[in-house]
Image (spheres, helix red, strand yellow):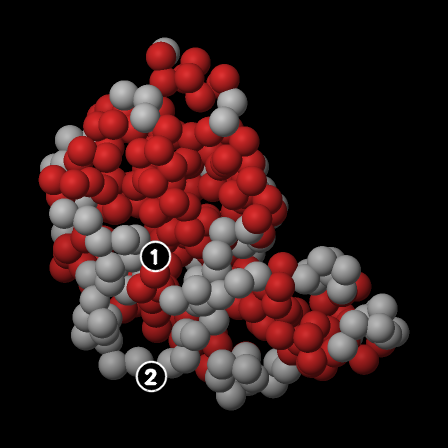
Amino acid sequence: MNKKSNEELQVIVDKAAAGDKNALETLIADVKDIVFNLSLRMLGTFADAEDATQDILLKMITHLSSFRGDSSFTTWVFRIAVNHLKNYKKHMFAHNALSFEFYGNDIENGKIEDVPDLTQNVEKDILAEELKMSCTNVMLQCLDKESRCIFILGTMFKIDSRMAGDILEMTPEAYRQRLSRVRKKMADFLGSYCGEYGSGRCKCRERVNYAIQNHRIDPLQLDYVTAAEIPVQTMLDVKKAMEEIDDLSQDFSFCKPYQSPERTRRLIQEFLDSKQLSIIQKS
């Protein structure tokens, strides 16, 4: 998010709430990538994250008048997004919960050698990278919603415990304890099973065809390898290093932030240009 003083930001929020389109565009430009990346990690797929991002930004727009500056604007947006995503029922995994036991069993017993070549002439290394990013992202679905959110805020966004506690309505101490436990749970699984981020037997390149067969990746729609990566610092004014939550050395570099997809940006702009916006703002 571009740095602005609290006074400058409050002026922009007030203008946006009063119907100033330029002010509203400024606010959306500042937070859209934050919202998209939180949605992607919470829900597990690009398509679901795009839909949720639009819902959350609409909710932000319609509630701007309730922002009073008691917390930072970023914290306020995070709180709206977290509450929305915790109750989101339309995503792929809403009624098909995953577990580490399921994932581990699939790694141990999946018949990867029985699957024919399904790569459709797409380079296997590219598909392996897509699978690595997809798999580790979907793996977050093995955590309960609260734990997933804690892990994302602490490990991807590197939010300090005071801000995270404010977002999640828990004490900083409780947040730090929960983050340490959930990081260890994720690290233990990766260390035991994943050959990309741990010492496990699972290698993405060897499982590409198995993943295609099970609709986990699609050679004709590569979301992760075609997405534009961006530094976390361009989205959020975060601390240079995460708090000393635990002593884990586990690699969680799969938590890469991405630019919100062009389709999402286009739909948001169409909404800003529509009569529907003025109707909502007047209601």
Are circles 1 and 2 on residues that touch, CB within 8 Å?
no
Q: Which of marks 1 and 2 is nearer the N terminus?
A: 1
- Residue at 27% in and 68% down: 180
Closest to the observer: 16 or 85?
16
Residue sitting at x 16%, y 41%? 8
Figure quadrant of residue 132: bottom right
The amino acid type found where label 2 is placed reads Ser
Q: In this view, does 170 lie to the left or right of 95?
A: left
197 and 66: which is toward the camera: 66
- The one nearer the camera, 4 or 36, is 4
> Label 1 belongs to which residue?
235
**Above or below, comparing residue 75 to residue 216 in the picture:** above
Q: Indicate the amino acid at tag 1.
A: Met
- Judged from this view, the residue extending furthest toward the top is 283
Instruction: Estimate the x, y position of residue 119 in percent, counting from the top left.
Output: 81, 71
Question: In which quadrant will I find the C terminus?
Answer: top left
SS assignment at label 1: loop
- Residue 61, relative to residue 216: is it above or below? above
Question: What is the tally of numbered marks visible in this picture?
Answer: 2
Residue behind mark 2: 249
Residue occupying image coordinates x 27% and y 21%: 18
Numbered disc in front, either 1 or 2? 1
Q: Is residue 229 visible?
A: yes
